[in-house]
Image (spheres, rainbow, N blue to C red):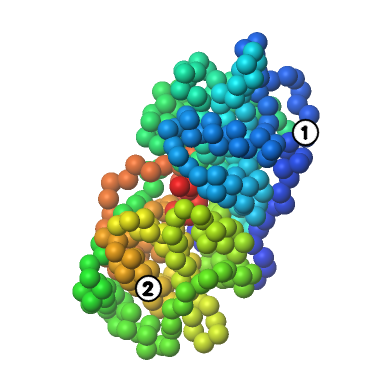
């Protein structure tokens, strides 16, 4: 199994955007068949993609949402593969690959998030998706990219049916913190932490001079903290400040609250909480494991979710995520999990083990 390794300096692993290279790379042959034509989308064609996805899935996503997700990432615009009917020029299928931060240890990888795989309802079950996948596989970049996705139960079942279930890993561990009125929540949390640590838990954190502040924008100063706390000898997703701002604070649809735990002028950890009605999800949690800063940050996240009127604060992650013991001591309640993620990568394919990954809810595609 992989294990965390300490990093004392350096910068977060990152690759440059290479959309133009992807878009203009020559392919060895024409794509498609007599009825359908396969091509790559320029951003000028994205509005047609938005309409197709809404039609295929019966959605009403806004233009602002799609522009944020497809065009706004600091890692580059989406790579979309299109299928058109030759006779009518009608767009009938699309698949989006969003550049995503990905690394193995301290080495940056070409990462992509798979999302919005869509076929118009009247042409489904004609093999269009498989034809498009075969076309994508002949692109020169295909052999060096790591593509992750989050298949639902139906998609996982289809992969099993066709003998590709080894590409889906999981289920991931998931559960939540029940959120009771703030006073009772704090009393129970402190009691659990006292028993687990043999000390005062959250009270120790307050006594040590820690404070929690809201983060209005992330800056590059957070990157060293992310590297120090999240670096992993296996596969992981390095979330730099510009990614965090885009992923959460620029989201035009969901509400995200970013919090940092500080001591004097030093930031010791940060987290991001998403709220949707009565539900909250802990998207990011970055702090040294099993230390006062982690306990203070977790308490702040739970109080923020409770204050927003949420009944539970959910979370999921991979098995060797470093804060599981801290969460357990603070009352994390497991539930049967069905959430899986898919990974496709270069051969030899050394990423096909759940224990080789460190991922959190913020690594899932939106919404």
Residue extending furthest toward the top: 34
The image's mark for residue 25 is: 1
Nearer to me, 39 or 161 = 39
* Viewer can see residue 228: no
247 sits left or right of 59 in the view: right
Q: Position of residue 309 (x, y in %)?
A: 29, 64
What secondary structure is found at the residue carrying circle 1?
A: loop
Whole-percent x, y for residue 281 in the image:
38, 57
Residue 36: percent from left, percent from top:
62, 16
| Residue at figure coordinates x 62%, y 28% from the top left | 82
38 vs 141, nearest the viewer: 38
Front residue of 276 and 350: 276
- 284 up-or-down from 140: above or below: below
Q: Residue 6: which quarter of the image?
A: bottom right
Q: Residue at x 78, y 29 (%)?
A: 26
- Relative vertical location of residue 288 with respect to residue 347 in this rendering, above or below: below
Residue 56 circle label? none
* Residue under the image location 56 percent in, 26 percent down: 93
Image point (62%, 51%), residue name:
72
Query: Is 149 rendered above or below residue 37?
Result: below
Going from N to C along the chain, the mark reached first, 2 or 1, is: 1
Q: Contact (CB < 8 A) between labels 2 and 1?
A: no
**Which residue is more in the foreground, 290 or 302?**
302
Q: Which residue is mark 2?
A: 300
Query: Is residue 131 shown left or right of residue 28?
Result: left
Q: Secondary structure at mark 2?
A: helix
Question: Badge 1: few (under 14), some or many (20 or more) residues near its Cα, within 10 Å?
Answer: few
Q: Is residue 179 visible?
A: yes
Q: CA distance from mark 2 to mark 1?
A: 49 Å
């Amino acid at each position: 199994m992989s294990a965390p390794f300490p990093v004392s300096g350096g910068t977060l692993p990152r690759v440059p955007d290479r959309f133009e290279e992807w878009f203009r790379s020559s392919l060895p042959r024409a794509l498609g068949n007599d009825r359908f034509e396969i091509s790559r989308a320029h951003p000028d064609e994205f509005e047609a993609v938005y309409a197709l996805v809404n039609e295929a899935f019966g959605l009403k996503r806004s233009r602002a949402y799609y522009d944020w997700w497809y065009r706004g990432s600091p890692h580059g615009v989406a790579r979309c593969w299109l299928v058109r009917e030759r006779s009518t020029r009608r767009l009938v299928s699309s698949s989006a690959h969003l550049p995503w931060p990905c690394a193995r240890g301290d080495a940056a990888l070409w990462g992509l998030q798979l999302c919005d795989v869509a076929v118009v309802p009247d042409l489904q079950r004609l093999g269009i998706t498989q034809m498009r996948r075969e076309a994508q596989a002949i692109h020169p970049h295909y052999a060096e990219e790591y593509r992750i996705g989050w298949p639902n139960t139906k998609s996982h079942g289809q992969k099993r049916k066709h003998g590709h279930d080894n590409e889906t890993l999981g289920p991931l561990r998931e559960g939540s913190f029940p959120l009771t009125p703030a006073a009772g929540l704090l009393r129970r949390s402190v009691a659990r932490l006292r028993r687990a640590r043999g000390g005062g838990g959250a009270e120790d954190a307050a006594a040590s001079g820690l404070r929690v502040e809201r983060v209005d924008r992330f800056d590059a100063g957070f990157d060293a903290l992310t590297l120090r706390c999240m670096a992993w000898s296996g596969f992981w997703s390095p979330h730099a400040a510009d990614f965090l701002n885009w992923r959460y604070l620029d989201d035009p649809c969901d509400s995200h609250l970013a919090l940092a735990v500080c001591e004097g002028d030093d930031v010791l950890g940060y987290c991001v909480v998403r709220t949707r009605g009565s539900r909250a999800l802990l998207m990011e949690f970055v702090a040294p494991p099993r230390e006062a800063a982690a306990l203070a940050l977790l308490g702040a996240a739970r109080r923020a979710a409770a204050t927003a009127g949420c009944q539970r604060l959910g979370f999921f992650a991979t098995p060797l995520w470093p804060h599981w013991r801290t969460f357990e001591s603070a009352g994390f309640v497991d539930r049967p999990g069905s959430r899986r993620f898919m990974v496709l990568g270069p051969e030899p394919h050394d990423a096909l083990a759940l224990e080789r990954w460190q991922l959190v809810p913020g690594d899932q595609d939106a919404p």
